[in-house]
Image: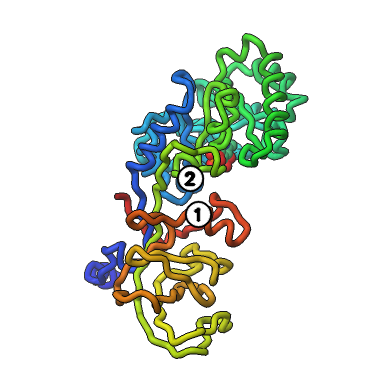
Amino acid sequence: MQNLMSSQRGLGLSNPRQRAWIEVKAAAIEANTRILKQVIRADCLFMAVVKADGYGHGAVTVAKAALKGGADYLGVATLQEGIELRRSGIECPILVLGNLTNKEDLVTCHTAELMPTISSLREALVCQKIAEDLGGEFCVHIKVDTGMTRLGFDFKDVCEAIEKIEQLPSLIVKGLYSHLALADVESANVTNKQQQRFQELLDILGHKKKKICCHLANSAATLRGNSLHYQMVRVGIAMYGYSPIQSLDEGLDLQPALALRARVTLVRNVPQGVGVSYGHRFITQRPSRLAVVAIGYADGVSRRLSGRISVLINNEFAPQVGAITMDQLLIDVTDHSSIEVGSVVTLLGCEGEKCISPHEWSEAIGTIPWEVLCGFKHRLPRIVI
Ligand SMILES: Cc1ncc(COP(=O)(O)O)c(C=O)c1O
């Protein structure tokens, strides 16, 4: 083992740009945060949502850049995500947006000074007991379901629940929030209904809510207008540089923070009529030059994208052809002159003035940009530039 460890130093594993990689522009996250902060009131807080490893960009990198850009709060989905941020030295308020159900997790949450989301009285009682046992207080946010039908107290029951939670002496309700189900579609009917329910609840709570940070808006709702902003907005996708609805970010100048790149490892000339890759789903229609690119579905480039995307190489678009395989894919470079082994291909993000957005991938295969971004595997090194 000792020999292997010492010999690894000479194995050339140190160049992360050898095969396939993700570049993350921290300055873009910072700039996007500043731009988005201008959309909200000066007294409205900004939560940077950095769950799922910062939407695949690297949570610590994103969190630090967002805080530099003026974010006040961070949002994570899991306890481990929150702990990773604390271990990196981040001290700002962090809300765990997912549900923590067992006592051990809630103890760790308390110790790490993370705030859990409370969706039931059972969870509130566990938190109260932990605070009593360990001493001190437990700061939490209460979630109310106004129409997403996922986490949260039912909006009809939440007032009664809040009254009971207020009797728990060690529980400090720092926030009250809900999540919108359809903020990113053109029609605002469901969003209006959810907002109406949220507002009715705040009206009933009256003066009590003054001490509480109330929040409802994701990126789409943040861009829709400040009637949805309340005391804090929770922004994910827009901070990474993508608009949840194309019409909403006009003039905002958000920049994509991520680029997915890989190298050509072989260039080959093939005659007309040759089947390419597994299943021969692509047959060359002319004598062709094909380049093998060292990235595949095991890196997060979905096999369902086979034959449906283009890449950028030397500032020109080239079509991807044949089935995307686990570790490689092919591109048709017949019309490109100077492609060679080692040439860099951009699959997502910008090269010069030209860009490829995750929207293009998600539209090609019937998913959403969020899933594309979260799908990149750890085999791809993240390089912060
Ligand atoms: C509770 C909650 N708030 C905010 C967000 C951020 O959403 P978006 O990326 O659309 O801004 C998410 C993301 O899924 C979420 O789950």
Determine whether, in the image, residue 216 is placed left or right of residue 197: left
Residue 98 percent coordinates (x, y): 59, 39
**Residue at (58% x, 33% y) in the render:** 221
**Residue at (53% x, 21% y) in the render:** 231
Q: Do the residues labelled 1 and 2 touch (CB within 8 Å)?
A: yes
Q: Mark 1 points at which residue?
A: 358
> Between 121 and 288, which is closer to the camera in this rendering?
288
Residue 58 percent coordinates (x, y): 41, 48
Ligand 1 quadrant assignment? top right
Earlier in the chain: of badge 1 and badge 2, it is 2
Mark 1–mark 2 distance (CA, rounded to whole Å): 8 Å
Residue 1 percent coordinates (x, y): 31, 70
Q: Mark 2 points at which residue?
A: 242
Residue 93 visible at all = no
Which mark identifies residue 132? Answer: none
Say which element carries label 1: helix
Determine whether, in the image, residue 119 is placed left or right of residue 374: right
The single residue placed furthest to the top in the displayed view is: 207
Q: Which of the 4 quarters of the picture holds residue 59?
A: top left
Amino acid bearing label 2: Tyr
Residue 152 percent coordinates (x, y): 68, 33
Say which element carries label 2: loop
Reply above or below: 298 against 126. below
**Residue at (59% x, 26% y) in the render:** 228
Graded by Cα atoms within 10 Å as few (under 14), some (14 to 19) or many (20 or more), the crowding at tag 1 reads: many
